[in-house]
Image (spheres, rainbow, N blue to C red):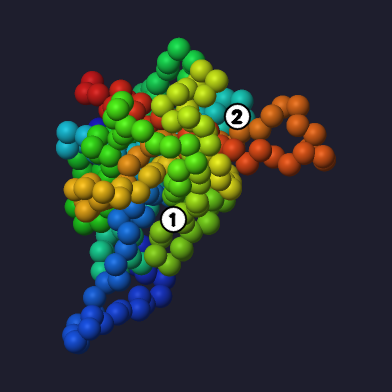
Amino acid sequence: MLWCSITSHPPEVPAIAQLSPGSTSPVAPAIDTLLLAVARISTFDLERPLTHATGFFFERDERLFLVTSRHVLIDRPSNHNPNRIEIEVHTDAADLGRSVTISLLLYRDGRSLWRQGLDEGGEIDVAMIELEPGTVPATARLHAFTPAHLLGSSGHVEVGSSLLVIGFPLGFHDTLHHLPVARQAMLASAYGMRFQGQGYFLTDARTHRGTSGAPVVLRERHGRAARAALPWKLLGVHSARLDMSGRDKVLDESLGLNCAWYADILMTLSERR
């Protein structure tokens, strides 16, 4: 059983209700479901706060997972070794100021509870934690990506295509409604090809610490998928900014490029065990 605790948070201030035309009953404003598929992650060493990051939900065969970057959960080069994380989820679709914090232990009996992968290029900077039944309260209002949101092997994305990276840069977010922010990105390398032999592609976007683990998505524009509850293709998982070791930090600006690991790794990590 995945150990967790749940803390409820009432709204900080009363939410402002809106009235629908011709109605005297307040209605909730329309929220892009993409924002409800992403969660803010805080990492801890016992009760000592460490870092902030981004995660998102993925569902397969009625099993719910939290996805983030592997280095959010452990990063030996920087001596980052949290033993638990916290995530926030909404509990009231009509009042997004209401949420709960779920605390998740990362180890049990000395063994890590997340899943991570390897390929011929080495470690993949993606991790998944299965959220066992009862971990997320029945009142939670969230959306999750599924295998149907992944781009198949026959899928094609043109270089230069407009993408979004949804996350919590430097921990920044709408603190009243507990929602992430979106950053514009552009596909900067050939999609479907492993950049320099690694299992990621490049994006051109302004990103910051705290965005690690964010979904990199492409809007569905045509067909039934464009009318789905979550009309986005999940292309990758944002990992880190890419830089050149030989760059003169005085004369040369940073490249402004980022690594995003291909999302198809989620199918391998979410296989039944």
Look at discs 1 and 2 and give the one toward the viewer: 1
Neighbours of disc 1 within 10 Å: few (<14), some (14-19), many (20+): many
Q: Secondary structure at mark 2?
A: loop
Q: Secondary structure at mark 1?
A: loop
**Residue 30 x, y percent position in the rendering:** 29, 67
User: At 61% from the left edge and 25% from the top edge, which residue is drawn?
Assistant: 77
Would you name the residue on which mark 1 appears? 180
Would you name the residue on which mark 2 appears? 79
Residue 35 in view, yes or no: yes
Q: Quadrant of the N terminus?
A: top left
Residue 108 in view, yes or no: no
In the picture, measured across the screen, residue 24 lies left or right of residue 200, that is: left
Is residue 53 or residue 83 the one in the foreground? 53
Which numbered circle lies on residue 15? Answer: none
How far, Cα to Cα, is label 1 from label 2? 27 Å
**Residue 28 x, y percent position in the rendering:** 27, 72
**Residue 7 x, y percent position in the rendering:** 34, 55
Among the 4 quarters of the image, the one containing residue 241: top right
In the picture, measured across the screen, residue 260 lies left or right of residue 78, that is: left
**Residue 151 x, y percent position in the rendering:** 31, 34
Q: Quadrant of the C terminus?
A: top left
Is residue 73 or residue 116 the one in the foreground? 116
Q: Earlier in the sequence, mark 1 or mark 2?
A: 2
Residue type, label 2: Asn
Residue type, label 1: Pro
User: At 23% from the left edge and 37% from the top edge, which residue is drawn?
Assistant: 148
Above or below, 220 against 255 in this view is below
In the picture, measured across the screen, residue 261 lies left or right of residue 101, that is: right
